[in-house]
Amino acid sequence: MKKIPVKVITDKIKSAYITSCMIADKELMTLLNKAIKTETNKRARNVLKLILENCRIAGIKKRPICQDTGMAVVFAEIGQQVAIAGGDLEDAINKGIGLACREGYLRASIVEPLSRKNTKNNIPAVIYTKIVPGNTLKLTVIPKGFGSENMGQVKMLRPGAGTEGIIEFVTEAVKNAGANPCPPMIIGVGIGGTLDKAALLAKEALFGIGKSSKDGKLIRNLEQGLLRAVNKLNIGPAGLGGKNTALKVTAKVYPTHIAGLPVAVNIGCWCHRAKTVII
């Protein structure tokens, strides 16, 4: 049995959250550079160039890439041979997020939903835990901005809707979102399970959490179809038009009931942030 002290978890979470807010993901930078090469709309190209410059300056000056430093979402994959020593896992995670907010000078954005009173430390985080084989603790820390989170949708499609129905729903969701989620977007799509499972799948798809389905070819074809459909909307970077409304679409599926076809869309803004640490 491997023992992991809660202080180690807190320190790792703090560092990961600060880093994710300030250092642009390599894949994101690759997608943005690719988008510039394919974009024919002059205004859209200028927006993409400004985004890349923003990321460069944020990394050099150690400042947040975006003023919205998000609501913390943490996926914890806990090895069966791991014991959390000296305290509670969720407390350790929340303490790390709180320290990151204070020491990284991150905007405190989290409020009580009814009173709207600010918690002043960006906690509590939204935490998902999963028991997996092995003796490691894998933590994926996500600062999820709400300009994009607000644009998410879930719909219970009729069972026979098929891929055409899925593409129609996702495309309509992105069309309704317009410029609100700060495009170019990255889009996660969850298909199957129950209403709540589909929503979780969409979040996992958006950030590459967990294993992919065995139906790899079917999913890849669907993802490509979705990306083409979304980019035909001509919303473009910053909503100014252009080919690159979305940089990437990722889908994740789960078996569902014969009477249903739940589908969820979780949209990420251009400022796609996440950091994974393994202890």
Image (cartoon, rainbow, N blue to C red):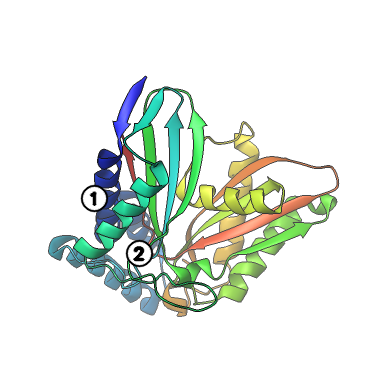
Secondary structure category for the residue under label 1:
helix
Q: Amino acid at mark 1?
A: Ser
Look at 61% across and 56% down and name the residue there.
226
Q: Amino acid at mark 2?
A: Ile
Q: Does 129 sit above or below residue 170? A: above
The residue carrying mark 1 is: 15
Count of numbered circles in the view: 2
Lateral position of residue 237 relative to residue 56, left or right: right
Q: Does 262 sit above or below residue 173? A: above
Say which mark, if any, is on residue 36.
2
Q: CA distance from mark 2 to mark 1?
A: 31 Å
Snapshot quadrant of residue 258: top right
Secondary structure category for the residue under label 2:
helix
Q: Nearer the viewer, mark 2 or mark 1?
A: 1
Let me know if residue 224 appears in the view. Answer: no
Q: Does 167 sit above or below residue 93? A: below
Percent across and percent down for residue 200 are: 58, 50
Lateral position of residue 170 relative to residue 128, left or right: right
Say which mark, if any, is on residue 77.
none
Q: For the view shown, which residue lies furthest in the left direction?
A: 61
Look at 38% across and 28% down and name the residue there.
83
Nearest to N terminus: mark 2 or mark 1 = 1
Snapshot quadrant of residue 232: bottom right
State the quadrant of the N terminus: top left
Q: Does 55 sit above or below residue 211? A: below
Q: For the view shown, which residue lies furthest in the front direction?
A: 86
